[in-house]
Image: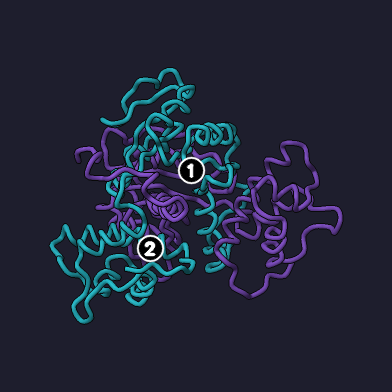
Chain colours: A cyan, B purple
Amino acid sequence: MKQKEIKIPEATIKRLSTYINCLERLDAEGFQVVSSELLGESCQVSPAQIRKDLSYFGEFGVRGVGYGTKNLAEQIKKILGLDKIWPTVLVGVGHLGHALLNFTFFREHGYRMVAAFDNDPGKIGREVTTDVIIHPIEKLVEITREERAAIGIITVPASSAQETADRLVEGGVKGILNFAPNKVKVPENVTIRNVSIVSELDNLAYLLSKKHGRRRLTRKKTISRPPKL
Amino acid sequence: MKQKEIKIPEATIKRLSTYINCLERLDAEGFQVVSSELLGESCQVSPAQIRKDLSYFGEFGVRGVGYGTKNLAEQIKKILGLDKIWPTVLVGVGHLGHALLNFTFFREHGYRMVAAFDNDPGKIGREVTTDVIIHPIEKLVEITREERAAIGIITVPASSAQETADRLVEGGVKGILNFAPNKVKVPENVTIRNVSIVSELDNLAYLLSKKHGRRRLTRKKTISRPPKL
């Protein structure tokens, strides 16, 4: 498989990630071979799109037969760098942090949560999962280094996001996934991705406004807005 | 302000959403007027990109002066349809559901959580926030209709995602934000957006693999993979 030196669209990378989930589900259902039609049906993506996404990386299936289900999942994992373990730390064990630490898909995709950090003394020492203990935030740099964590996940409030990013960088991570609502700055050798959940909802609101018109969907703010708490 | 009939890039809509947060923070810090440079610095977006994003929707600032901070935030909210209240329900009050129900940005952007649903009898009747009570899943259609909810958020496990979507559609929502890892089908008059958190992390892993090479960043799975639980 020869990887071409062209820029792969981000949307393709995201779809490849979902193809893994679909392929593993189809494999569990007993499909040893899948066509792009079946995979597309399962993933809600057109078969042509699947073929195009895969074509960036080489030839995978057998014409008229399909793709080996397990094999294609493995190939895609290799493309995304998920054929190895990614030691990962998480900072900020609120509800979102908890949700992510317990997210089984992370483990299945090769992320190994090695430590979690919080500044609430009541949480320190608690086991979130069987593998992960909550450490005090003061130990972030030290433990991140010891565990040779490559990825840091930020789920702290906006006000501590930049400081958290700085410490993760000091601890040696090469990539950060930031869920805090404000963006953070990192040195050039560190890759950052910001996940804005409210932006996803805003995007939906925008699409709905355009599609249905606002009047019938929403209420005037002045009438029904609840008091600010 | 005349809205042009051209397709606005999704990335623009996402950035508009973050501009709101940055503008509100700048406003709180006392900046009544902001330049695209200051806004760009605050949002980690280039000033040229900001001007381009806004240019899709008309003229906002005053050349050589800048944008009125409050005014621009309001204008962007109007563009995105956030100048009205969006009654919203959430299904599946696990850690992620809890995190979203408590997410203050949702309220600030005009989403009003009107009800939450779960199938765990131990959770029914509990108040998640002062406004939101957890109802049994059997009441989803009825309450969603009563509350005239326009948006449904799905934070249930993969296995119940499609059934949940069907009930939300029956309850009359026009848009669904789906956090379950599998995609769901909805009728054409309903807009769906799938948020895949693992895809965001996979995208980061892919970027890191390309940038740093895999060897130095990760460990062989065969050696250090923890036993599957």
Q: Amino acid at mark 1?
A: Ile
| Position above or below: B179 against A92 | below
Q: Are marks 2 and 1 on the same chain?
A: yes
Quadrant where the N terminus of chain A sits is bottom left
Residue B15, percent from left and from top: 60, 55
Is residue A64 left or right of B19 when viewed as pictured? Answer: left
Residue A176, percent from left and from top: 48, 43
Task: Work out which residue is located at the far bottom of the displayed protein and give it.
Answer: A64
Of residues B103 and B39, the one drawn nearer to the viewer in this rendering: B39
Quadrant where the C terminus of chain A sits is top right
Identify the element where label 1 is drawn.
Answer: strand
Instruction: Tell me how far mark 2 sits from mark 1, CA to CA.
Output: 21 Å
To which chain does the residue with label 1 belong? A
Q: Amino acid at mark 2?
A: Arg
| Position above or below: B121 against B210 | above
- Residue at image point 80% right, 43% down: B32
| Position above or below: B135 against B61 | above
Identify the element where label 2 is drawn.
Answer: helix
Q: Which is in the foreground here, disc 2 or disc 1?
A: 1
- Residue at image point 77% right, 64% down: B59
Is residue A71 left or right of B180 when viewed as pictured? Answer: left
In this view of the protein, can residue B41 be seen by the observer? yes
Is residue B120 left or right of B31 when viewed as pictured? Answer: left
Of residues A163 and A210, the one drawn nearer to the viewer in this rendering: A163
Of residues B9 and B118, the one drawn nearer to the viewer in this rendering: B9
| Position above or below: A214 against A168 | below
Residue A202, percent from left and from top: 54, 55
Among numbered discs 2 and 1, the one appearing first in the sequence: 2
| Residue A176, disc | 1
Which residue carries the number 2 mark? Answer: A15
Is residue B14 left or right of B27 when viewed as pictured? Answer: left
